Image (cartoon, rainbow, N blue to C red):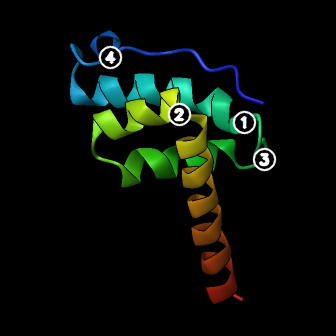
Amino acid sequence: MYVCTRYKAASVLPRSPEQQKNTIGERLYPLIHTTQPELAGKITGMLLEMDDSESELLYLLESPEALDAKISEALQVLDAHQAQNK
């Protein structure tokens, strides 16, 4: 279950792009950890690498449904990668 807190874009956008991603990652990680504790770090990193748009990442912070969809997508990518390496 998510405890969703709204994040305003202004809270992360005045920083450098690297700082923005770090801040967003720090906020995404606990949300991902609630459903995927073993893979939270990996999935957070994947989302930060796949989504260059800070606005889309901010949207994931505000939308549990969108975040769940991205987590599912990341899990599919990880499963496919593991299947290829067997």
Mark 3 vs 1, N-terminal side: 1
Q: Name the residue under label 2.
A: 63
Closer to the chain start, of discs 3 and 2, is 3
- What amino acid is found at the position of numbered circle 1 in the picture? His
Q: Residue 31: x and y, percent?
A: 65, 31
Label pair 3/4, CB-CB below 8 angstroms? no
* In the image: residue 65, left or right of residue 62: right
Residue 33 bears which disc, if any? 1
Which residue corresponds to mark 4? 12
Number of other residues with Cα within 10 Å of mark 1, as a class: few under 14, some 14 to 19, many 20 or more:
some
Mark 3, Cα crowd under 10 Å, few <14 / some 14-19 / many 20+, is few
Q: CA–CA distance between discs 4 and 1?
A: 21 Å
Q: Nearer the viewer, mark 3 or mark 4?
A: 4
Nearest the eye: 35 or 69: 69
Please tell me whether mark 3 sits on a helix, a strand or a loop.
loop
* Cα distance in 3D space between marks 1 and 2: 16 Å
